Every structure is written in C-alpha cells, then in structure tokens.
Image (cartoon, coloured by chain):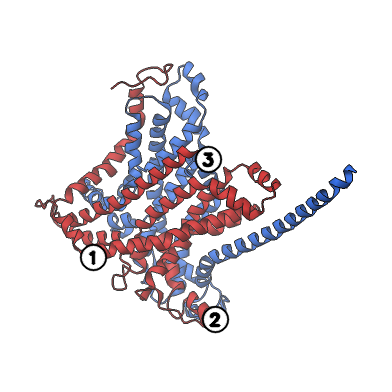
Chain colours: A red, B blue
Amino acid sequence: MTTPSVRPGRAPGQGRSAAAFLAPFLLLYVLFIVGPALYGLLMSFFDTSMVKAGLSTFAGLQNYVDALGSSDFWSSLWHTVWFTILTTPPLVIIALALALLANRVGRGQWFYRLAFFLPYVLPSAVVALIFMWILSPGIGLLDTSLGKIGITPPNWLGDENWAMPALAFTTVWWTIGFNFVLYLAGLQEIPRDLYEAAALDGATPWQQIRHVTIPLLGRTTTLVAVLQVIASLKVFDQMYIMTSGGPNYSTRSLLEYVYDESFTNYRVGYSSAVSMLFFVVVLAVSVVWFRLVRSQQKEV
Amino acid sequence: MATDTLAPPLRARVVTVETVDRRVTIFNRICVGVLIAFALLWLVPILWALDTALKPNAETVNTTWWIENPTFAAFGRVFTDTDMLRWWASTFIASALSTVLTVITASLAAFALSRMRFRYRNLVFWFILAGIMVPSQVLMVPQFREFQSLGLLNTFWAVALPQAPTAIAVFIFKQFFDGLPADLEEAARVDGASFFRIYRQIVLPLSRPAVAAVAIFSFVWAWNSLLWPLLVLTNPDLMTIPVGLATVQGAFGIRYADTMATAVLGAVPLVALFLLFQRNIVEGIAGTGIKG
C-alpha cells in the first residue's frame, strides 16, 4: 500500500514517537474495553457460569437461540425501547426550547444553568431517593399537590401502567441539563449578525427562531438525539433502585435482565449472548448517526 | 413633490418598526416568564428534599413547605448512622484516579492523532472511536472476571481502570487540538524541541477549556456510576456514594428527614464542584466541538 505523503515537509519516522504517545491509552483501552468485549463474545458461545471458572462447555449458537426465543428477553427489550420512546422526544424538544429561551433572554444565564444542569450532577441514587419520596403514595409532594386540585393520582411506582412513565418523568428532570448545555454551546456558534439581518428584513422573533436558529442547529440536534437514544437504551440505575424492575417486571430493562441473568441466575454465557444482541442494537443506532452526520456535512 | 411621494411609505415603515419593537418586547417578556417558571419547577425537587431534611422526622408527613421546628438534627444523624465520610473519601479517590488517568492518556493519544503523521493513523482513530459504541454495561461480566483473576476486586483500581479509557475524551481532545494553528509549534520544531516538549509546554497550556471539559465530565461520570462499583466493591469500607446510598435506601424506613438528609449530603461535593466550574462546563463544550 502506498501512502501519499500529504505533508512532504514533515520528517520521517514519526511512527515511533506516535506509538509512544498512543501506548498508555491503547494499553488501558485494549486491557479493559476491547479485551473484555472479545472475551464476552467468546463466552456467548459457551455455557459459562458465574460460579465456575473457565468457559465451560461449548454451546454454539444455543444461547442466541434461547435469547431470541425467550419472552423475558423480548419484554425487557420492549421496556427499554418504551423507555427510550418516552424520554427521547421531551429530552430533545424541551432542552432545545429551554436553551433557545435562555439564549434569547441573555441575562441571568447562571441561574438557568444552575436550575437545569444541577440535577445532572446528582448521583442516580440521590435522584432515586428524592423522587421516591416525591412520588410516594398518599404523602408524597406530587400526590398531595394533585389532591388539592381534586385529582386522585395512581400509585405511580406501584402501578404497572404508570411505573414506566414515572421513571421517564424522573429521568427527564434528572438529565435534561446535559442536552441543554449542548444546545447552549451550539447556539453560541451562531453569528449575531444573522439575527440582525433577519430583524432588518422584518422577521418576527418567532420567524427568526423558525428560519434561522433551528435550521442552523441541525447538526447539534442530530448529535443530541442520537446520544440521547443511546443513553436511554442503556438505562439501568433508575430502575434498579426505584422499582427493581417491578411491579411484576413491568420496568425491567434489558441491562437489568443481563444483570439478573449474570448475578442472580449465574447464566453468564447466556447473558453475554443477550449483551451481544444489545450491542447490535446500539451499533445500528450509531451507524445511522454517522450516516446522518456525514450527509449533513456534505450539505454544508 | 418628491417629499409627498416619499412621506407615506416612510411613515408606514416607522409604524411597522414600532409594532415590531412592541411585539419583540412582549415576546421577550413571555420568554422570561416561561423560562423562570420552568427553572423554578426544576428546582422544586431539590428544594423539597432540603425542606424535608430540615424537618424533625415526625413532621415530615405534614407535606407542607412550612417547617414548624426546623432542625439540622437529621444531617447530624447521617454522620452517626451511615459511613458518609468514608463514602465521600472513597468516591473522591476512585473518581480522581480515573479522571487523572483519562486526562493524561487521552490527551497524549489525541496529540499523536492530531499532530503526527504515521501509518494507520485513521485506522487507530476509528478503532478508538468504536469504543463510544460499546455500552460499558455489556462489558461487566468479562471485566468482573478479569479483576477477579487479577485479584483487584475491592480495590479502587477496579473502579478507576475500566472508566479511564474513555473514547469520547480522545475525540474531544483531538477536535480541540485540530483547531489549534499548525505554525504554533513550527518554531519549536525548528529549534529541535521534542514532541513531548511541544505537547507539554505549548499545546497543553492552550487547551485548558478541553482539559476542563474532559476532567469535569470524567469526574461526574466516575462519581455517579453505580453498577460497576456495586459489583466490584462489596467491602463496606470502600463503598462509593451511589453504592452506599443504594444499600442504605430503605434502611431508614419512614424516617424521611434522615433519608433526604442522606441524599442531600451525598450530592453536596459534586454540587459544590458544579457551582465552582459551571462557567467552564458550557465554555468547555463550546470550544471543543462535542456539540457537533
């Protein structure tokens, strides 16, 4: 293979220095990410168990067949997808709206950053404790507030139909700050004079937002949306602490299923196969993202 | 004559500008109103947690914002009834270890990818970038076995090492370094400075926003991670805050003031960090190109 010398002025032999710079990261990366990922792939073809050392007996594709034939797998996959559907649109749209408003208002930015970003730095366990208290039936803040306007709320976390929306609501409150900041950063890149030009042409504020700001935030929106989908698919903590997958398994996410199979039922080979299927889903989403980003870059 | 024909449209235009101005003012007022309403709404859960923590336990079922007998007693009980101080220390050590490893290794790697020419450069970059797509939870069983066989379970290394190689950190640093002008280091190169000197004395000092963004996010992610530390830290002496809180949850039963005080104290260090660095967070992201 011939490598065209892009920069003829550069001295040869940078390969060795480059290797030295890359080595520390690549060492950690191969040891703790790539290695385990390949080992996980290997385990998914064996009847590996948590309680026995080694890989145990070869199972071929049996784990994958079992996973795809298991109603527990499909229901936990559905819960994960349902959670993603419930959280992604508000986490993108509300974050965008709040960032647009905060950017427009200009003054007091620190206050809005404080209000919206602060929850993001809270540990999941803290968020869970606070919301379990707010959502607790009868005496929680939400129930008593709704009670005052004459609404009898359901038992949020104890009702199969309401547990997932309650978890989604908690998650929107908790994580919106990250997307909000990404949008604020994107908004800072838009030149002021574009708005001035639009204003001179008589565009109303709403028209400016609609025809100048939102189109220019296209790439940010793609990024935010895909990072959000991936993050929502990876949900675990909230459900693990707030509902433990209940009531009646109605909020068991795919990763909680992996966790249960590995550490409660000790079926490591099987849970590895489930992990690999999950990885395929995330990979598919990521590939769509890269394609979208690339097509947007071509437009610019 | 000329003024006669010009006047009406001119007057009309003045009126339009005034109307637009008025509309803009109204629009801006609505914006401020909506924004403040949302911001207050967003603060309610945190304020409610604080409010509850300041009540005596017996008063917590009143569900009013008003506190009859405000007291800090619940905060005091957290320190006597839980290992909060120890959790703080553990979480800090594990997160700091992981953050330092991430910042150093990722910035070195990104420097090579951005400033040096070598074979397979793109291949290496894509190999690292692929790491963004691997959900860390998928790796938990193999990693668990790895640390088990290394004999590192129940050590801070077990928490810090898998979190250190963060592909997105390399990506952020590379984006930032790519944006620095090339002639910066030309002079140094002519003077015969090594790559390491250029990295340490020229590029790194200019990259403070990127370092701040990567450090803050690595620290927050490491600090808040639950699942992995839950698996590898079974020794109560080493528990991190998320693990400790998850295990203590329910232990307080109906002592809601104590529970909320625990939650508040568990959040305090990162909230303080955020208050100190909140400006850097937005600037860091704005300057580094994660926003797309």
Q: Percent x, y for residue A118? A: 51, 57
- In the image: residue B166, left or right of residue B148: right
Say what secondary structure mark 1 lies in: helix
Q: Which mark is on residue B287?
A: 3
Kind of residue at badge 3: Gly
Number of numbered markers: 3
Cα gap from disc 2 to disc 1, whole angstroms: 40 Å
Kind of residue at badge 2: Ile
Density class for disc 1 (Cα within 10 Å; few <14, some 14-19, many ≥20) is: some
Same-chain check, marks 2 and 1 = yes
Q: Where, by quadrant of the figure, is residue B24 drawn?
A: bottom right
Say what secondary structure mark 2 lies in: loop
Q: Percent x, y for residue B6? A: 84, 45
Residue A122, visible in the rendered structure: no
Dividing the image into 4 quarters, which one contains the N terminus of chain B?
Answer: top right
Which residue corresponds to the image point at 48% horizontal and 54% vertical from the top-left? B270
Say what secondary structure mark 3 lies in: helix
Between marks 1 and 3 in the image, the one whose residue lies nearer the viewer: 1
Q: Which residue lies furthest to the right in this view?
A: B1
Kind of residue at badge 1: Asp
Q: Is the C-beta separation of discs 2 and 1 under 8 Å?
A: no
Viewer-side residue, B258 vs A124 = A124
Residue assigned mark 1: A72
Q: Percent x, y for residue A67? A: 20, 59
Cα gap from disc 2 to disc 3, whole angstroms: 47 Å
Viewer-side residue, B173 vs B14 = B14
Residue assigned mark 2: A149
Q: Which mark is on residue B285?
A: none
Cα gap from disc 1 to disc 3, whole angstroms: 45 Å
- In the image: residue A2, left or right of residue A106: left
- The chain letter for the residue carrying disc 2 is A
